Each structure stands twice: as C-alpha cells, then as structure tokens.
Image (cartoon, rainbow, N blue to C red):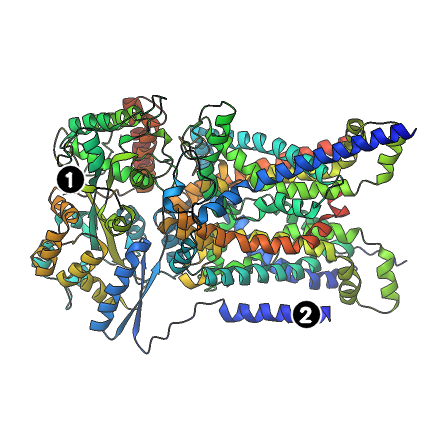
Amino acid sequence: MAIYKKNKDGLAAAGFLTPTLIIFGTFILFPVFFSFYLSFQEWNAFSWEGSFVGLDNYTRMIQTKEFWDVLKNTLIYTIGTVPLNMIVSLMIAYGLNQKLKGKKFLRTLFFAPVVVSPVAAALIWRWLYDPNFGLINYSLGFAGIDPINWLNDPSAAMFALIGMGVWKTFGTNMVLFAAGLNAIPDSYYEAATIDGAGAWSKFWNITIPLLSPTTFFIMVMSMIGSFQVFDIVYVLTSGGPLGSTKVLVFYIYEYAFKFTGEMGYASAVSYTLFALLFILTMVQVKYMKNKALA
Amino acid sequence: MQKIDKKYKYLNISKSVLIHILMYSLAILTIMPFIWMILTSVKDMSEIFVYPPQWLPNEIKFQNYIDAFNAAPFGTFYMNSLIVALSVTLGQLITCSMAAYAFARLEFKGRDIIFYIFLGTMMIPANVTMIPTYIVLSTFGLIDSLYSLIIPGLASAFGTFLLRQFFMTIPKELEEAAYIDGASKWQVLLRVIIPLSKPALATLAIFTFMGVFNDFIWALICINSEELKTVQLGLATFRDKYLTQWDLLMAGSVTATLPILIIFFVAQKYFIQGITLSGLKE
Amino acid sequence: MKNKIISIFIITIIALTVISCSKSENNSDGKVVVTFWHGMMASSVPALEQLIQKFEETHPGIKINAQTIPNGDAGIQKLMTSLQSGTAPDVSWIYSDYMEDLVTSNSIYKMRQFIDGKNGLTKEDLADIYPSLITYASWRGELYSIPMEATNLALLYNKDLFRQAGLDPNHPPKDWDELLDFSRKLTIDKNNDGKFEQVGFFIPVFPATGSRNGWMVWQYRPFLWQAGGDFIEKDQSKVTYDSEAGIKALTLWQKLFQEQKLETFTSDFDMAFISKQLAMAMDGPWSLPRYKDLMKGIDWAFAPLPAGPAKQATIVGGEYLCIFKQSEHPDEAWEFVKWIASPEAQAQWCMTSGYLPIRRSVKEIPAFKKYLEENANYKVFVDQMDVGQAELSIDYGAMQITQHIGEAIEGVTIGKRDVRTSLNNSAKKSNDLLIRARK
C-alpha cells in the first residue's frame, strides 16, 4: 500500500478536472460572484454601469411588504407540495414493487408527466382547470362539489398550482423511491413474515426505516426544487390572481428581466433565497446526522 | 392445513386484483391530461367548448395536424432540440465522469473544498446566473446560435455528484489489479470504472437529456432566428400566435410531446436500471 | 460491434452540431441585408411577406430578413439582451413601454436625423400622419420611431343576440349608460342555476403580474379618457390615474365585472363570442382577417366604443419602427422604414393585413376608397381614428407603473376591493417609484 501524500495525484487531478472547471468557472462561479457584487449596486442593465449603494437593496427588500408575501407564498407552495409529493410517490413506488402485470408499462405512464415540457403541460392544465368547460370541475360535480374557479380565485389558485406541481414532479421521486425499495433485501421481509408480521407492520417497521436515506435525499431535493419553482408558475398562473401564486423566483424574474434598473435588487433577493436554501439544507443534514448517531 | 392454504391463495388473488385495479386506475388518472390533449387535437372547434365536456370527436379531424405543421416548422424545431440535448448529454457524460473520478479516487489538495463548492452551487437559483452567463456568451459572439444552449451545459454539479457517489461504491481492488498491469489513471477510468458504471451513466444521460429538451426560459433568451428555435420555444411562439385556437394548439402540443414520450418509453429500461444507485443513499 | 455503433452515433452528433449550430447565412448575392424584428400574429404574416416582396422588387439592392419575436415581456427581454451583446436587429417593432430603456441606453436613432437628411420626409408628409401616432412614437417630445400601422379599439357585438334580447341590432350602445343597460339585458341565466349562460359585455381581467397585463391596461385606458382623466402629469412628476375620473372609470369596470360574474373567464373572450355565449367585447382591426373564417354563422359587427361622461374616445396604438445604432446599414434601414410609411405601401399593407393606415391621405387612394366601401367593419376603425388618443409614454418605470394600474384593476374586480383605496394604493407605489427614479 502506497503511503498517502496529501497532494500525490495533483497533476492527474488537474487533467481530469480541467474541462469541468473551465465551464464551471465561466458559467457558474463567475456569474455567482458577479451577481453577488450586483446585489450591492444600483445597476442599469442597458448602459452596463452601476453605483455602489451598500446594503440598500437588502434593507429595501426587508421593508417591502411584497417580498414577505412572496416568501409566504413560496413557503405555502413548498409545504403543500413536498409532503404530498413524497406520499404520492412513495405509495406508487410501493405499489409498483408488488407483483404486477405490466409493471414497466405502468412505470412509464407514471413518469410521463416529468418528461413533458412545462409549456405543453400548462396549456392542457389551464383548460382542465377552466371553471366552465374544465374536466376537473366536471368531475367534482359528480361528488356534489360546486364549481371552483381554480385560476381566478385567489384562495384556490395556489391549490391549482400545487396540483399541477405534484403531478409534474412526482415521477422523479417515484423512481428514486423504487430504487430505494429495490435495495431492501427480501430476507428482511421473509424473516418478518415468519414472525407473523402483517403488511402494515412490515411497511412501518422495515420499509420506512430502511428507506430513510432515500427519503432524506428526496426531501432535500424536493425542497430545493419547490423553493425555486418558476416554470409552472410562469406558464400556468403568471403569479396571479392578485399575486396569490407569486413565488420568490418569479419575483426575482420580474425585477431582473421586466423592470428597468432593478438588477441589483433582483440579485439581493436571489442571494437571500440562496442563503435560505443553504440554511435549510444544513439544518436537515444536521438533524439527519444526529438521528443517525442516536 | 390445505384449507388454510386455499384461503390464503384466495386472499392473495383478491389482493392482487385489487392492487392491479388501483395501480391501473391511478396510472390512467395520471395520463388523463395527455388523453384529453390527444382527443382534443382531432376535434373540431365546435366540439371543444361544450358543456358537459365531450370525450370523443364526432369525426376525427387530422386537418388540425396539417394546419399546425403548415403553421410552424416543427421538424426544424425538433432537429434543433435534438442537437442541443444530445450534445449536452454527451458532453456531460465525458466531463462529469472525469471530474467524478478525480473527486472519488484521487488525492489532491483542496479536493473537499472544491467538491463542497460544487455541491453548494446546486442551491443557487438559475435566475441568479442568467444575465452574467448571457454576457459571457455574447462576448464570444455565441448568442443566437445553438452553441449558446450547449456550452453552458457542458458541465454539471449534479452529474458530477451523482457519478462520484456511484464510483465510490466500486471496489478499489478492481482498479488495483489494473494498476499492477501497468495501466494509467486514464486507462483505469476508461476500462474499469466506466464499464462498471453504465447504469449510473444512463441515469445521468436521461436526466440531462430530458432537462435540456424541456428547457424553455434559457432558449427564449438566447435564440432569435426562426430556424434555430427549439421545440419548447417553437411551441411557446406558436401559442402566442394562435392564442385561443385550441384545436391547433393541442395538435401542436401533441406534436411537441409525443416523440419525447416514445423516446422515454424505449429508453426507460436503462433508466430504471440506472436509478438503482446505492450511491444515492450516502 | 456495439462500441462501433456508439462511436458512429457520437461522431454523427458532433458533425450535426458543428454543421447546424450557427445561423445559416442567407445567400444575399451582394445585397444589403436588413434584419427586421416583429411580433405579428400568424394571420398577418402572409400580408407582411407580400409587403416585403413588393419592397424588394422596387429596391433591388436591399434584402429584408424578417424575424418573429415574442410579444410583451419576452419581447423586451429579447431586445434588452440582444442590445447588450451587439446582436440587435437593424429595424424592430417597438411599443411605447420600451422607449425609455431604448432611448436612455442610447440604442436607437432620433428620426430627425433621417427626416432632415437627403432622403428625408417633407413637412407635409409628417402632417399627414395622425398626430396621436406621432405623440406615441415620441419620447419627451422627440421622435424616435415611425409608425408602421395604426390600430384602435372598437366594440364587437353579436347582432343575433341583440335581436333575441329585444334590442335593435343596428343600435349598439352609444354611451356608458346604454352599455350598462344593454349588458344587463344581454346577461342571461337560462336555467336559473345562478350561472350565466350568456354574458353581455366582456372586460378583460388578467393577472397584473402576467404577460397579458399590458393588454388589460391598454383596454382600460379609453375608459379613463372617456371619463375625462389621464394617467400621468404632462411633466411626469406624478401619476393621475387615481383622479375622480379614474374612480368613475374603474367603478364602471367593477360593476360590469361583478354583475356579470366575469371571474369565470380565464382566457380571452373570442371562444365565448364564437360559441354565442357573449354579446359584446372590445377588439382591434388586427382580428378582422381571422374573423372571416372563425365567425361563420354569426351576424357580427363592429361599432365605435361608447362615449363616457366626458367625451368619445378610443385608444390608438400600433407598432412603431425604430432603427438601432448598432445597425451597419442605417440608410438602407431608413429606406425600408420610409417606404413603409408611404401612402402606396400603407394602402397595400392595410388592405391585406387589416391594420389601419397611419396617414390621412391613404383614404384618397381609389383602391383604398373602394375597400372602405366594401368593408363596413373596417371603416368603423378608420373613422374612429379621429377620436383616437395615444397614451403618453412614461419616462420612468413604465413597466412597473403599468403593473400598478393592473393591480388596481385586478384588485377591484377579482379581489372585490374598494375602488378608491385600490387606486390610491397603486398610485402611491407609482409615485414612490417616480420619486426614487428622480433621485
């Protein structure tokens, strides 16, 4: 066994990393630092010049009511989407893990929404949600539920967004859960069967605990994903009605690309979002570690 | 004894039937929007806006597709999307496996720091980097060319992370045998690691392909020329132009959606294998 | 074997990429190529192609490369980014909302430069163009663009539904009172389930944050003028859309929206109109070509917008052509712009596209005269040009102020909020913005 020198593969590593580092440095790191710099500037995107304003952008953000509304909407979306998404995807993955005919076919069907572009998906969903002609209200009618004005009622639009959001993304999590379920050795279940455990007991005592690394990974990724939701908001509700579905990234988009001279402010909000996500992830990692040690 | 067996068998069959019914109905529910889209795409305008909703068209109207194809060059859009998605996928497979190998196996200064910076960037919203990225591309004169969609995607933190996790699960003994035979690090990567990592590579390939294929905002910003538009951008312009002509819009949406679904259907075997990554659990 | 297939596959991708990544340079045979961006609806593109063909026939040295760009938000985003990277077109369609950005960044030419030049325009030419268009095409009194076509808003209505409701099909609403009255008569709940099967008059309400906000506010503007109000002080020191006139106009919208329960409309009105569930709406001349096919079996007509308590008014819009300083061929670009503004080109363009001419003298051209006689609906728009008003372009934060107005409209209709408070809140935001911009 060779003695480890700290930098023994330095040269080789440089070779392996160069292509990645070039692209990464140019298109990720430089932009990240540049927009950090922008967040302390009042920036004119046209003339490409700015003036240093210190923390003004950040203080303005804290004092703006809209920012807090938008943050609240983002939280509601995340709380509405992540657990629902995980429950749905775990249930379906569990179902697919049973003996089934046409398993592959089913899996493809469940995954299909992920594959479809948000533009096409929103076109069809706008219509499903139509209060007069939409299939959703029509179906609810059979259950005796009065028509809901999904996209024009501020109290319903977020649910509409969450509905489409879960539909569009649960497939990815389903596949990840399926992988996790596959990795649980059959012997555990067999042993439990011999001990006389029922299906529920097996699910709670074997599946859930052994799946927890996968669950954790999925939770972190889904949370990051839903905090950054943009595409489906842009195409389904445009942040309306009355701003009820305006989320953080949509807010950033408005200030960065729609309004003049607000790049600096947009960058400040972006960095706040980044910090939030970072803290959130760290807390989760910490919690997970503690749990693993206990 | 036999009696009990029979009872179990009976229970199992009914349980199995139940699961089948449940799973198939859920699946149909999931793809209901597509079914609706396809059915609408062959309806006449007069059948679209009726209440209660009408499921089947009175007469299948393929004319909608002819009209949609006459209205927009979907063939060109597809070609562009495929070029971009395939190039990015191929590029990421190369760069990510190289970088992942370095992070998983090599000892060098600053390895962990660089790796954590990589991971950290996954949390940065894409909007933050958009404008500076655009500036960089424009200084090289790459705007309004497919390169502007390809080059920024040629490396990926997610891909590097995914492959690194997988590479770490490969037993070191396999490589050591190769080193004894006098192989270089590059040869080990190519001949030992890569062949063992096909599932992980397939996963990355499909994730990347789908992601790039469905990207909309970036293409919207970078592409001007009609002949360079991608499917998503083409569909969005198509939507703006035909506002409420749902028959054409649905025909266009089906045209933009169905092929990718078919590709996915064919490729999913590799995909599902690939996703079974023990690496994800760490 | 498998490896071989894979390598062939990879090589093919690389080859394809290299071949097709860049724009194929059009073979221009030594001609000067002028790139022209527009956001025309698909139904108008054939007319544009004819127009360009005509230009290229009469100007053999110039080739026009017309490209479609998206409307609204996405359009300005494209222009912004293309300017930063030096890939701007020679000539582009613009709206008044873009003017501030384009002028302050020194991106477009003053038209004066070309008008006074050798190949310029005469005083008579300029006086022939509708003054409202000139206002709209200017920024702080300086002309930065030349109108390509004019549009305005008129009232679209279904004569059959008028008859069914016992109204005279040849007497569309003349003022706000009639508009409200007729709307009530035309709004019908056939089976008494609390849901209207037919609605009288559609007013557009879209999310203020969305890309159709501009379109909503644009249609609201005539109502503010009809009530005697305006949007902003002439010196741009503060907004005035929260005046008493503003309250009158928005109250009318609120009433119309709530009485007819318009919140069930989540898309634009045309499908409802075509399926005979809607009797009246506002629309522009650009829809005339497509309505010919779309409105089979409906007895429809256009009429002037009803007059308000103060006056008769409609909004004049249109698209304006500006020339970018990045252009390598500004003179050829000007030649194209100037030619489009000529009466002959205008006559051809307007008769094929359904847009309105930008100058009065087009009405004297015999072919156009005949066209007017044969197309009564089109004539409504042309006649309305005389009461047409143009919005004053806003110097600072036009996009944000438009969004503030949109928020007020959305707030009192969908949000059922109080008109005065909503307008005041929005106006305060706009004024704060103007103060900040001034600093």
- Bin the neighbour count of mark 1 within 10 Å (Cα to Cα): few under 14, some 14-19, many 20 and up: many
* Quadrant position of residue B170: bottom right
> Label 2 near label 1: C-beta < 8 Å?
no
Whether residue A9 is visible: no
Which residue does the image show at 37% across and 30% down from the upper left?
Answer: C264
Q: Is residue C141 left or right of residue A265?
A: left
Which residue does the image show at 25% across and 50% down from the upper left?
Answer: C292
Compare residues C260 and B1 and report the one nearer the observer. Answer: B1
Q: In which quarter of the image is the C terminus of chain C?
A: top left
Whether residue B268 is visible: yes
Q: Which mark is residue C334?
A: none
Q: Mark 2 lies on which chain?
A: C
Compare residues C409 and A207 and report the one nearer the observer. Answer: A207
Mark 1 lies on residue: C304
Residue type beneath disc 1 = Pro
B167 lies above or below A280 = below
Q: Report, in whole angstroms, how far the alpha carbon at label 1 lies from the one at label 2.
A: 68 Å
Residue A242 position, x and y percent, is 40, 30
Mark 2 lies on residue: C5
Residue type beneath disc 2 = Ile
